[in-house]
């Protein structure tokens, strides 16, 4: 067995394994691997069909029949990887994805990269040919060991005939960020960022079980599993979180009030968690929370903060940062100011953070964090909340006027309608929808819906598959909001094979015939100058002229179209009792989104000037 640890992290694992006295046949080795997975707490495995991985397929079938694991079959390895990303994000547990050898392994790279930067414990189990077939021209045989490079916490190859159990155990520990480290003759556990690992398992023929007894109770053609509406949903139990929040609030208030008042704001980036909202509320500080922070709630949370920062932000003296900020340039500018003290709360290693590369001081103690932040001076937070309400009202007027003039909904208006009608998990595409929601999602007083987004690398890859994984792990109706290019990019994610459990998933597509997000970036200004207008349209916007409903229907989805806010809201309300997979295509303004955003900026600036 050959091992390789990611040099970008402190993970390490023994790369040596003594050859067993007797070689294990492939089915026996696969059973040991699956046993180690279930013993290590793996509940979900995504399996792609293939011959070299057949021993694992049969072993997984046995384990599933025994009720020890749930297997989800997908045809496309890239989508299988992102299905595992969604499952891992929603369950918080390691999720395995199994492929055969060859190009199938490479298809996992986008999901592995996302899992690396998002800190998700994805276990890539890649079947391989035995060593004697490498370099011989054998079919589907390539150098796939260590293929993912620094994107995995640990990559290990187990030779054909060897017991994979130790390698599986080491990989699961590394995926969870728990790496054994020997110091002074004792073995300690080093904490590293959670993330993906690769188990490259070589199998030698024969690849099928010699005895059918293990699968005697498995029907040849199992019926499609019950819809999720027929299965008891695993609702999130918030009682422990509420108790912890109340306990923390007392600690925050005590430490904060012992410090002098300070004009501090709290920034909650991606994956910050509810702690950020509890912290801001306890100290009475303005909260600037991204949609995927899981902290966009509470009495001090703001929605239009990106428009407030150019004016109110000038008075900020200190920033407390939770999570990773990924969306707003005004927030990035605030964090980069030399005259503003900033700290980053980092209770455990984060995959996106390398010590010394950011200017924020690292704080690991909540008490120290509260003492740094202090409490808000009189009128400080109220000025932000009042300005936020006024700016939000002005933005709503601009959107309503624009929609009335064009006869189409706007992206921000659609996002607000979806948010207001939401009663469960939401998955966002990492293009315009996440930004539209950041702009218009009114914070809720109590904890709002859990928002998921692939913000590790902020790509649009695999968004439909990720949403399906979230829905399958959440075991309840899940809504996804994305653009048409994101939808088309992952059209394969619409497919659920016949005998697989269906996600209860509602997908809303803001249809503007291409990547109009580029119009809101600097490329929009280039297009407006004239000579490069066609180039920007063709090379960046990439219009396609397609209707999306027929595509979804070809994959067995129910498809509808809505053109009004009321129709969108009604469709979402119907989803509370609907089962299966549904698509709603919503045509949105496509002609000049840059002009709309400029109008919103002007309205916000005028509102703040008049105050």
Image (tube, rainbow, N blue to C red):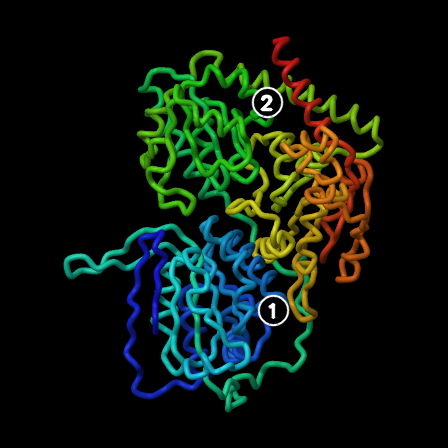
| 216 over 536 or under it: above or below | below
Q: Residue furthest bottom?
A: 210
Q: Circle 1 is placed at which residue position?
A: 73
**Distance from Cα at disc 2 to Cα at disc 1:** 46 Å
Q: Position of residue 108 (x, y in %)?
A: 54, 62
Callout 2: few (<14), some (14-19), or many (20+) C-alpha neighbours within 10 Å?
Answer: many
**Image side of residue 607 versus residue 132, left or right:** right
**Image side of residue 59 versus residue 11, left or right:** right
User: Closer to us: mark 2 or mark 1?
Assistant: 2
Q: Residue furthest top?
A: 610
Which image quarter holds the N terminus?
bottom left
Callout 1: few (<14), some (14-19), or many (20+) C-alpha neighbours within 10 Å?
Answer: many
Which image quarter holds the C terminus?
top right
| Residue at the (31%, 29%) spot, across then down | 368
| 89 over 13 or under it: above or below | above
Q: Position of residue 516 (x, y in %)?
A: 71, 38
- Provide the secondary structure element on which disc 2 rests: helix
| Residue at the (37%, 39%) spot, across then down | 346
| 117 over 285 or under it: above or below | below
Q: Circle 2 is placed at which residue position?
A: 307
Q: Nearer the viewer, residue 533 or 293?
A: 533
């Amino acid at each position: 067995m050959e091992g390789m640890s990611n040099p970008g992290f402190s993970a390490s694992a023994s790369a040596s394994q003594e050859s067993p006295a007797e070689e294990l046949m492939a089915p026996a080795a696969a059973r040991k691997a699956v046993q180690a997975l279930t013993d290590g707490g793996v509940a979900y495995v995504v399996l792609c069909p293939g011959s070299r991985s057949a021993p694992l397929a049969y072993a997984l079938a046995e384990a599933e029949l025994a009720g020890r694991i749930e297997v989800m079959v997908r045809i496309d390895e890239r989508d299988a990887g992102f299905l595992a990303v969604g499952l891992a994000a929603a369950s918080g547990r390691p999720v395995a994805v199994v492929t055969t050898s060859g190009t199938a392994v490479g298809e996992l790279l986008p999901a592995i990269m996302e899992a690396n930067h998002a800190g998700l414990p994805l276990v890539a189990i890649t079947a391989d040919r035995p060593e004697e077939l490498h370099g011989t021209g054998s079919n589907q045989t390539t150098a796939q060991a260590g293929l993912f490079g620094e994107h995995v916490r640990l990559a290990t190859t187990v030779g054909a005939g060897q017991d994979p159990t130790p390698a599986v155990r080491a990989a699961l520990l590394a995926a969870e960020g728990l790496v054994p480290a020997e110091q002074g003759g004792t073995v300690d556990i080093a904490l590293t960022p959670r993330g993906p690992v690769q188990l490259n398992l070589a199998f030698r023929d024969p690849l099928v079980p010699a005895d059918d007894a293990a699968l005697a109770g498995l029907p040849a053609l199992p019926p499609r599993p019950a819809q999720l509406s027929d299965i008891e949903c695993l609702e999130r139990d918030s009682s422990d979180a509420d108790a912890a929040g109340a306990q923390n609030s007392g600690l925050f208030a005590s430490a904060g009030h012992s410090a002098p008042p300070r004009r501090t704001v709290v920034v909650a980036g991606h994956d910050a968690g509810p702690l950020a909202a509890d912290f801001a509320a306890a100290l009475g500080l303005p909260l600037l929370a991204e949609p995927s922070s899981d902290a966009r709630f509470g009495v001090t949370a703001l929605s239009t903060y990106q428009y407030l920062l150019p004016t109110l932000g000038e008075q900020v003296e200190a920033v407390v940062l939770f999570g990773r900020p990924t969306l707003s340039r005004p927030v990035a500018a605030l964090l980069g100011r030399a005259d503003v003290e900033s700290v980053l709360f980092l209770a455990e290693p984060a995959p996106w953070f390398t010590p010394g590369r950011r200017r924020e001081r690292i704080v690991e103690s909540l008490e120290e964090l509260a003492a740094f932040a202090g409490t808000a001076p009189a009128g400080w937070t109220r000025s932000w909340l009042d300005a936020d309400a006024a700016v939000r009202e002005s933005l709503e007027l601009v959107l309503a006027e624009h929609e009335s003039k064009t006869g189409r909904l706007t992206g921000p208006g659609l996002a607000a309608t979806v948010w207001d009608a939401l009663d469960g998990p939401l998955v966002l595409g990492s293009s315009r929808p996440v930004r539209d929601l950041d702009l218009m999602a009114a914070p809720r007083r109590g904890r709002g819906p859990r928002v998921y987004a692939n913000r590790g690398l902020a790509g649009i890859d695999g968004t439909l598959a990720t949403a399906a994984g979230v829905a399958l792990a959440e075991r309840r109706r899940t809504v996804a909001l994305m653009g048409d290019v994101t939808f088309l990019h992952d059209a394969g994610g619409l497919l659920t094979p016949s005998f697989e459990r269906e996600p209860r998933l509602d997908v809303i597509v803001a249809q503007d015939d291409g990547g109009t997000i580029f119009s809101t970036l600097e490329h929009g200004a280039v297009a407006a100058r004239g000579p490069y207008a066609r180039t920007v349209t063709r090379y960046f916007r990439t219009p396609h002229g397609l209707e999306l409903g027929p595509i979804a229907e070809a994959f067995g989805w129910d498809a509808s179209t809505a053109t009004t806010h009321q129709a969108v809201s009604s469709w979402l309300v119907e989803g509370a009792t609907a089962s299966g997979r549904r698509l709603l295509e919503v045509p949105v303004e496509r002609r000049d989104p840059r002009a709309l955003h400029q109008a919103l900026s002007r309205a916000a600036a005028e509102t703040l000037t008049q105050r």
